[in-house]
Amino acid sequence: MADPLCLEALSALSGCTVERGASTLTTPQDFVNIVALKEYYKQEGFKTLEYPSIGSLSLDDLDGQDLYSAPPALTEGPEESHRTKLKINPEDFFHPQYNYDFTNIKDGDKAFLRGGEPYIRPCGWKRFALRVMKKYDDDLWLGTGKDAWPVSYHAKNMDGSLGVILTHGGNPEDKPQFLDAAAASLVTGETRGQGVYSTPDIKMAEKYCRSFKSKVDEKTYKVVLQNRINPEKRRKCQRENTWLVYVPKDCSDVEKRAIVQESIRPYGLLLKQV
């Protein structure tokens, strides 16, 4: 029963209707691009997102929830007939060999590292692995050693209300105009940083994640994407355990997708029964 449930979870994350198909035009990387960029375009006030091979995706299904307030109530979302449909072949999209059930695991004081940084495992969740090995130049980013990328979690409702970048979090020579803008925002009271947000803390991701009621078993689940984040592209925010991948306003749609792909790579779909 994992396949139908996972398709429902992908639908809840993306706001699209994800169905089984003979071939997969939408890869796991495409999927995280869609989820992340829909949040970003929503921040910027757009109503639709154009994505290759899919077309125009409405942003109307995204919640306008302020992340400093309580998480949104469970909703059924827009009617299925109004949703963009995505077809994936689960055999191409998922990698069951690397599934892992953290449901009954409690790490306590145990410490884990990925890329030399703390890895908070998603205890209480079940991970459905995505087929991402050998899809990039190498697989070092997905490892456990010093060359691996740290783990981050992305929830549907994580957006710019999480806070501005700390100006001392990076090299001022990298993006001086952006760092200056961040510093100025502290004076003007603006709290939104521009880009894609994630967190190393699964508990924080859970607070802002999407929930859905499954038609498969009539149970309610929470859903989060487990990713690796490029430490060279990530910026730490004023709010603790919040990371931002900066996306400049003046870059093209192709450049925006490239920034996300170079910065955030998914490897697990996390589900937790409520």
Image (cartoon, grey):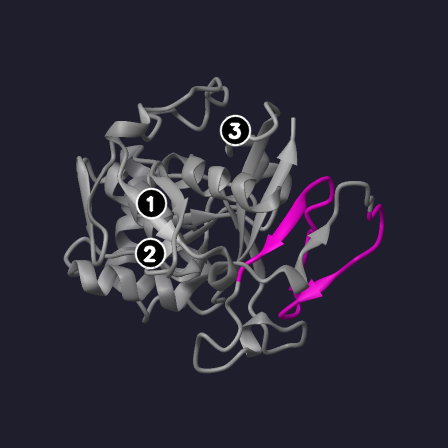
Instruction: Give the quarter of the image for residue 184.
Output: top left
Instruction: Determine whether the residue tagged by mark 3 lies in a helix, strand or loop.
Output: strand
How packed mark 2 is, by other alpha carbons closer than 10 Å (few <14, some 14-19, many 20 or more), is many
Q: Nearer the viewer, mark 1 or mark 3?
A: 3
In front: 181, or 34? 34
Label 3 sits on what residue type?
Ser
- Report whether 152 appears left or right of 188: right
Q: Which badge, 3 or 2, is on the more N-terminal residue? A: 3
- Report whether 185 appears left or right of 199: left
Label 2 sits on what residue type?
Tyr
What is the spatial separation of the Cα atoms under label 2 and label 1, in whole angstroms? 8 Å
Q: Which badge, 1 or 3, is on the more N-terminal residue? A: 1
Instruction: Determine whether the residue tagged by mark 1 lies in a helix, strand or loop.
Output: loop
Q: Residue at x 56, y 78 (%)?
A: 140
For label 3, the residue is 211
- Report whether 74 appears left or right of 80: right
Q: Quadrant of the C terminus?
A: top right
- Residue 124 in the image: above or below residue 212: below
Q: Which badge, 2 or 1, is on the more N-terminal residue? A: 1
Q: Residue at x 73, y 44 (%)?
A: 123
Estimate the x, y position of residue 210 in percent, counting from the top left: 49, 32
What is the spatial separation of the Cα atoms under label 3 and label 2, in whole angstroms? 27 Å
For label 1, the residue is 193
Q: Quadrant of the N terminus?
A: top right
